[in-house]
Amino acid sequence: MKVSVQSTSGRPLGDYQLPASATLSSLQPLFHAAHPLYYPDRQRFYPSPAAPSATRPPALNPDSPLSDADVLLFKDLGPQILWKTVFLLEYLGPLLLYPLFYNQPRWIYGDAIHAAVTPWAREVQFSALMAWTFHYAKRELETLFVHRFSHATMPLSNLFKNSIYYWGFAAYVAYFVNHPLYTPPKEDLVYTGMCLFYFMEVGNLSAHWTLRMLRPPGTKVRRIPRGGLFELVSCPNYTYEILSWLGFNMMTKTIAGLLFMCAGAFQMLVWAGSKHRRYKKEFDGKDGRALYPPSRKILIPFLY
């Protein structure tokens, strides 16, 4: 069969001969051979809409079947980078920057280091350093050994956006928590926050492990996650993470830390809502598919 490809503006990009019953994955290497700049991870194809003014249909995936005389629209996703590489680099910044503020105050604060730092303030600063380092070291290890990525790559530009967020907030929070004039909360609040932080970090890891075990290696199997907090919300990994940062802020009590927690919570709320909708759409109970639990909330048990 013959499949034609056009740019989204209608410019012809070639005709391709494919075997019968071919899928998009058969076209991608042929398109790459004809247009070397556009390797498969950089390609996105859409069915041509029925009318020029019609809304563009959803993007095809590599398993989408093709038919003779199909006309596909091509979109360049731009230079790509491995998801794993992005995660490792964006988390590396917080791991390196935060300890710098704790260990080298003379570089950061200058003459302010001569301020009298109380033993309790120094103890809280050290506890915050350990919590921060634990969190991002865990993220690096999860990236290497736990997470399985449904897509191999993402746009290279995401590396810069994500790194600005993580590296920038690391410096912002570290500056105020480790300042020589820092005033820590009372002991009961610090210890309560510390317990909450580590308990939620373990919960976050357990949720990530549950998600890993849903999909056997090398497959695209999709299942409904079960067990623990998954019985109440779609994205308990985000719930645990928000609560862990709440614990960190109880320990440290700074405006910078609160803003970091709120920014992260807002983004996770957006991601959780999107994932919840995908679950409900995919597991709709039709044609033998499982039905997604209708009582399961998005992020906050029993509420949202």
Image: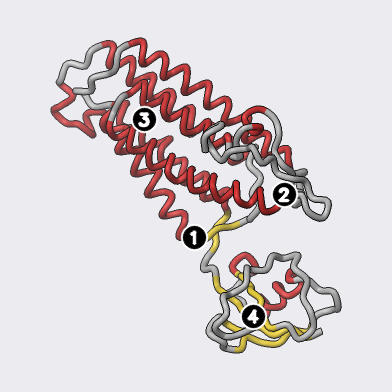
Residue 283 is labelled as: 2
Choose the circle earlier in sequence order: 4 or 1.
Answer: 4
> Are there few (<14), some (14-19), or many (20+) residues within 10 Å of tag 4?
many
Which element is circle 2 on? loop
Q: Which residue is mark 1?
A: 156
Which element is circle 3 on? helix
Q: Which residue is mark 3?
A: 99
Q: Amino acid at mark 2?
A: Phe
Using the numbered discs, state the Cα–Cα distance from disc 4 to disc 3 in whole angstroms.
53 Å
Where is residue 185, by image quadrant?
Answer: top left
**1 and 3 marks in contact (CB < 8 Å):** no
Residue farthest to the right?
20
170 or 257, which is in the foreground? 257
- Which residue is drawn at the image coordinates 82% and 55% (left, top)? 287
Q: Nearer the viewer, mark 1 or mark 3?
A: 1
Residue 163 falls left or right of residue 185: right
> Are there few (<14), some (14-19), or many (20+) residues within 10 Å of tag 3?
many
Residue 134 is labelled as: none
Using the numbered discs, state the Cα–Cα distance from disc 3 to disc 2 in whole angstroms.
45 Å
**2 and 1 marks in contact (CB < 8 Å):** no
Using the numbered discs, state the Cα–Cα distance from disc 4 to disc 2 in whole angstroms.
28 Å
Residue 48 is labelled as: 4
Up the image or down, 183 lies above or below 240; here it is above
**4 and 2 marks in contact (CB < 8 Å):** no
Using the numbered discs, state the Cα–Cα distance from disc 2 to disc 1 in whole angstroms.
32 Å
